Amino acid sequence: MEFFRSRLAKSLLPYLLLAIGVIIAWHVISEFSTVFEWLGWVWRIITPFFYGFILAYIMNMPCSLFQKLYGKIKWGFIKKIARGLAIVTSYLLLVAIIVFALWLIIPNIISSVAQFIDEMPDYYERAVDFLYTFDSLEFLGIYVNMEPDAYGFLPEGFHISTGDIEAWLQDIMQGIVQNLEFDNVFQGITTVFGGAFSVVFATVLALISSIFFLIEKDKIKELLDRILKAFSPTAAYTAIMKYSRQLDKNFKQYIKTQTIDGLILGTLATAVLAFVIRSDYALILGLMLGIINYIPYFGSIFGSLIAIVVVAFTQGIGSGALAAVTLLILQQIDGNIIQPKLMGSSFKMSPLLIIISVTIGGAIADILGMLVAIPIVAVLRDIVDNIIIHFEKKKKNKQEEVSD
């Protein structure tokens, strides 16, 4: 035991740790597929708890609000159980929202999808008729007819083959019909029900774990704080705590503002599509725009494009153009008035930085990475700014010393 406490043993310890690290790295590289499979197995086990943590993080916001409200009640018994009451109230509110969605929104979505499928042949015929109205016409030097002349040559200009487009539409229709065939539907149903048990089990486990995360929140924070304080230098601990609090603040603000903004945008889009465009799919398109708005920059653009295509396909090019104009106006109002008012100065970034952040986030963690990219990049931006300021002050001090 005395050897391990000696100065020689302490001096050899870093080399021993380095050797162990090299051996572990070598085994990981040589058995990469096995390690990858093992990591996938571990991820499948902890996935419900991971989503439970995310749900607990989101539910902690209304829970904290209800806890403050219950804390203002003068009864001592209510104050003692304020945390428990807040958790119960928050999850009852979540259940009420889910029941409302299942009772009102989901049936309308199902009926809209069923109507779209039933009327698909009519939409197809309308698209084909639109193509052939431009067949053999010339406008602005653009020839729509691809038929060759008597010598086998095509007319000069830009050519659009109505035959090829019709064939493409037929392929799409055939693919939809094949996917709706009994065998494929039956296979899809059996696949869904085959994995239903695991999905339900994982969902229930995530829900239960989220409740316990909320109950044990203070104890978990205290444990993590002790571990971090014990195994990190004071300066590193201070910096980690500072930026962790800032990241937590950014996430909460981002979730709140995007939720409010999505509700506003989805409601306005639904109203415009229903009363101005008179689309039969106003509810489902407005709901899609509100949800996809969580993805910064790209979300509203992609959602608007999908809505425009659906309107043009179901109601004609004129209605599609009107939908494009109205949705563009809504996007400008949202991007220049509503979002800046909601978000303030915390998330003011250049469009280029937003595009890069969302793209990298999506490449790393798909949709989840796109959702969390902006709050994380906002903190990284502040860290880089603080580092630059530190070195600028350091350089300025050196210049002042030299001048003196």
Image (spheres, rainbow, N blue to C red):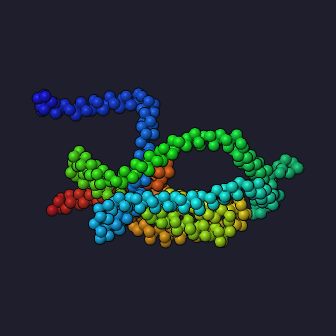
Picture coordinates of residue 216 (x, y %)? 32, 52
Picture coordinates of residue 222 (x, y %)? 26, 52
Place residue 86 in its image quadrant: bottom left
Place residue 312 in its image quadrant: bottom right
**Does 60 sit left or right of 312 as displayed?**
left
Q: Residue at x 69, y 55 (%)?
A: 114
Q: Quadrant of the N terminus?
A: top left
- Residue in front for this viewpoint, 74 or 115: 74
- Residue in front for this viewpoint, 270 or 64: 64
* Image position of 36 with respect to 136: above or below: above
- Residue in front for this viewpoint, 224 or 146: 224
* Image position of 41 with respect to 339: above or below: above
Q: Residue at x 49, y 70 (%)?
A: 338
Look at the image and tell me whether residue 16 can be seen: yes
**Does 229 sit left or right of 335 as displayed?**
left
Place residue 393 in its image quadrant: bottom left
**Does 28 sit left or right of 107 as displayed?**
left
* Image position of 69 with respect to 356: above or below: below
Q: Quadrant of the C terminus?
A: bottom left
- Residue in front for this viewpoint, 65 or 142: 65
Look at the image and tell me whether residue 378 can be seen: no
Picture coordinates of residue 358 (x, y %)? 48, 54
Q: Residue at x 40, y 59 (%)?
A: 88
Q: Residue at x 76, y 48 (%)?
A: 170
Q: What is the total number of numbered labels drawn onto the structure image?
A: 0
Picture coordinates of residue 376 (x, y %)? 39, 55
